[in-house]
């Protein structure tokens, strides 16, 4: 799926419910995110995801490349023969029906000092203010953090995303919790032609090394539970400089999950 169609499909997916719907026939319908890999027994493309049911398989996933990040709307019928506990245990995955899917663009978190990392004190060329940086944290899968952002812009406009952090920054105590700040911004990649609307876009950020770095630091200081991550974002511009805002709803990250490579 090309990026234009992926964007449109993602918008359609967001019209679907984001909560689990338990059907009368022991079924689950929901949205989820994941990363595609080829399983070793039959060579099928399966999707590792944050759901507790384990990896998913659907014939529609065969159209994706290994390593692709994807957002799907799926139905899992746990009464189906292919989803019996014996079959799932043997195959290593459940079988689902996917009614819509879209590839999610991948990015990598960068240090302030990394080449190409944007200067937090300067407005970027074609920078776009962000309305809601974390409309929904969809999950952490194989080192990628999937996040849904909201912008006010033409629905056919395409953007580039940047996520950075200060490696020298110390943890701040927020509501009694050790909290670390990360910085999000976006620029216009291609100009849209439609009327501006509030629209959501999903991105996946490879953040594994950063999370592991913090988790090891926290564990060595005696914290074995969780640390928190807080999003800062460019919400506007004033006197030629970016206006930084902060979402005070910090995201918990379980230290044991990170250090056990569970995510």
Image (cartoon, grey):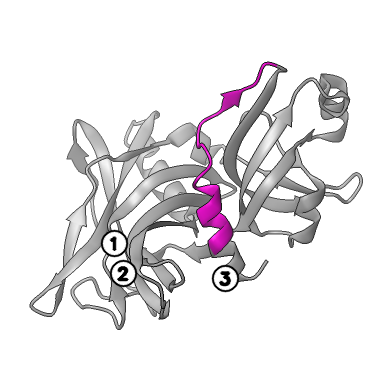
Give the secondary structure at mark 1. loop
Name the mark nearer the viewer: 3 or 2: 3
Is residue 121 toward the left or the right of residue 207 in the image?
Answer: left
Give the secondary structure at mark 3. helix
Who's the residue at 57% across and 40% down the image?
31
Is residue 210 toward the left or the right of residue 29 in the image?
Answer: left
CA distance separating discs 3 and 1: 20 Å
**Quadrant in which the N terminus appears:** bottom right
Who's the residue at 49% across and 65% down the image?
107
What residue is pinned by disc 3? 4
Instruction: Report if residue 261 is visible in the image.
Output: no
Front residue of 167/159: it is 159
What residue is pinned by disc 1? 130
Front residue of 8/106: it is 8
Is residue 35 toward the left or the right of residue 161 in the image?
Answer: right
Instruction: Report if residue 98 is visible in the image.
Output: yes
Counting residues from the start of the chain, the first of labels 3 and 2 encountered is 3
Counting residues from the start of the chain, the first of labels 2 and 1 encountered is 2
Name the mark nearer the viewer: 2 or 1: 1
Residue 244, horizontal then vertical, whole percent: 18, 62
Give the secondary structure at mark 2. loop
Residue 33, horizontal then vertical, whole percent: 58, 46
Q: Are marks 3 and 1 in contact (CB under 8 Å)?
A: no
Name the mark nearer the viewer: 3 or 1: 3
Residue 178, horizontal then vertical, whole percent: 26, 38
Which stretch did the figure color magenta?
A: 8-24
Quarter assignment of residue 8: bottom right
Residue 109 is marked as none
What residue is pinned by disc 2? 112
Front residue of 46/256: it is 46
Single out the residue that lies furthest toward the left: 239
Is 94 located above or below residue 67 in the figure?
above
């Amino acid at each position: 799926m090309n990026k234009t169609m992926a964007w449109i499909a993602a918008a359609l997916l967001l019209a679907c419910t984001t909560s689990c719907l338990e059907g009368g026939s022991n079924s689950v319908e929901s949205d989820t995110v994941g990363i595609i890999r080829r399983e070793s027994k039959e060579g099928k493309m399966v999707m590792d995801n944050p759901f507790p049911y384990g990896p998913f398989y659907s014939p529609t996933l065969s159209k994706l490349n290994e390593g692709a990040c994807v957002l799907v709307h799926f139905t899992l019928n746990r009464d189906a023969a292919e989803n019996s506990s014996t079959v799932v245990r043997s195959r290593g995955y459940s079988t689902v029906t996917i009614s819509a899917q879209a590839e999610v663009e991948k990015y990598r978190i960068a240090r302030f000092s990394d080449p190409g990392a944007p200067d937090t004190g300067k407005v970027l060329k074609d920078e776009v203010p962000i309305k809601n940086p974390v409309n929904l944290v969809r999950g952490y899968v194989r080192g990628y953090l999937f996040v849904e952002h909201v912008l006010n812009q033409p629905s056919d406009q395409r953007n580039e995303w940047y996520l950075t952090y200060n490696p020298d920054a110390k943890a701040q105590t927020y509501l009694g919790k050790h909290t670390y700040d990360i910085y999000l911004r976006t620029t216009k990649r291609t100009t849209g032609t439609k009327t501006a609307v509030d629209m959501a876009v999903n991105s996946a950020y490879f953040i594994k090394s950063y999370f592991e770095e913090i988790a090891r630091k926290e564990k060595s200081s005696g914290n074995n539970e969780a640390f928190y991550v807080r999003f800062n974002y460019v919400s506007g511009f004033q006197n030629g400089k970016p206006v930084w805002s902060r979402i005070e709803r910090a995201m918990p990250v379980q230290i044991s999950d990170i250090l056990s490579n569970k995510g």
